[in-house]
Image (cartoon, rainbow, N blue to C red):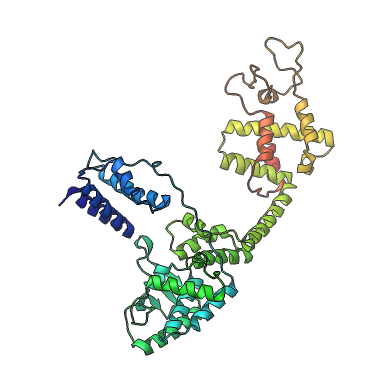
Amino acid sequence: MNPLRKAVRDYLAMRRSLGFKLAKHEVCLREFLLFLRQKRASHVSVNLALEWATRDLNHKPGEWASRLSIVRGFTRHWSATDALTEIPPLGLLPYRPQRARPYIYSQLEIQKLLKAAKNRPSIDPLRPWTYYCLFGLLAVAGLRISEALNLQTGDMDWSEGILTINKTKFGKSRLVPLHASTCKVLADYVKRRNRRFGARSDGPFLLNKNGNHLDKGEVHRTFYSLSHEIGLRAVGASRGPRLHDFRHRFAVETLLRWYRAGEDPKRRLPVLSTYLGHAHVTDTYWYLTGTPELLGAAAQRMEKRWEGLMRNLANLAALLQSFFTVRLITQRKVSAHTIASYRDTFRLLLQFAQQRLHKAPSQLGLSDLNASLIGEFFGRFRKKPAQRPAKPKPSSDSHPVVLSLHRTGGAGRERYHPTGIGHPKPTPNTCLGWFFDSPGDRSACGRAESNQVVGTP
């Protein structure tokens, strides 16, 4: 056997064992092997791969890039065995496909589609009910069209109301719980199907007029016809809502229900991801389209969250406690020396505010620490430029830690450490800047805990 032909066969077998179907890849790689034989080439080169990918001038640039990408994947695999194989670089045929804009069906549109499917004239009495069940199942369960067409009679557990989806994308299987009303419609379809073709324990769940699998192309054509009939697509339009958009709608509507029920979508998202059959939660993000209803629900949740945060901001003790324990220790994981610098800076600031405002530190709020007061606080430690000694020493009325924290500004100026050695600590500007700019939750605490943080020796 030709080494390249065997390599392609092994490559496809390896990828398929990982769950990839690669139907298009097999066709393209066979065409590529035939092209190499016509060129009498025993090794893959970049020029040959590029010539094959772009030889059909009727193809669009996206198709050229797709064909070259298929060859690139194979050459990466084969280059480990054949050192003469060249791998086409990634930027050779750059193309970024545009994401199709999903269409979020309304409840009324779905009802019109199901009604039109059930009332559609047909010589086969079961055909209208088949499409009625198919489109309804896509809408309420978020299935892929291939998953719905591949359903088998034994995949439905009627006692539990659970549908088993076998050998889906990447070879996975999953359980899909169905609502009682959905189970009732499916059970009615089974009775009609059994009267038409007889009872059966295996075989396809949804049947065509001959009692076999539904053809995917015929399903799409029927959907397009019904879409024109009910006004989903304009007359003569070649583009419009797709069957796959039912899956987008299911994801958006599920998230919207969680928002309205007051649940945390972030915590519940793995449930939706599992229901849809995604390997990672990030795959589910693709289906979350920002509809006006969803954005409105998210905005309401954010407003409620900010109201709680602003109530906590009024409590300076809780804010300081959260800043030290959450922001510095948990998030930034700063050292004990840095924490001590922040502690001493805030201690001095609270003492200064007490003198200026005649309020005890426990009675201060965040609104009291305004820009004017902070500016006066920094002004206390600003050095005079005139008559500066060669080696400045801390004055008697200056706190040693203040000097260690003082930001002198300008290049070449020194910062002082209380011990005279070690690394310079954060300056008051830095400490307070991080404090007022730090994002995240402000966990509430009692006055005693806050005083303990600020008053730690």
Q: Is residue 230 above or below residue 295?
A: below
Mark yes or no: residue 164 visible.
no
Instruction: Give the quadrant of residue 457.
Output: top right
Q: Nearer the viewer, residue 148 or 202?
A: 148
Count of marks placed on residues = 0
Give x and y (percent) for residue 326: 61, 44
Give x and y (percent) for residue 142: 48, 68
Q: Nearer the viewer, residue 452 or 291?
A: 291
Q: Is residue 29 above or below residue 368?
A: below
Mark yes or no: residue 361 visible.
yes
Residue at 49% of width from left, 58% of height from top?
A: 284
Q: Is residue 376 above or below residue 383?
A: below
Taking 413 as reference, is 194 left or right? Answer: left
Taking 328 as reference, is 176 left or right? Answer: left
Instruction: Give the quadrant of residue 172.
Output: bottom left
Residue extending furthest bottom?
Answer: 195
Give x and y (percent) for residue 184: 48, 83
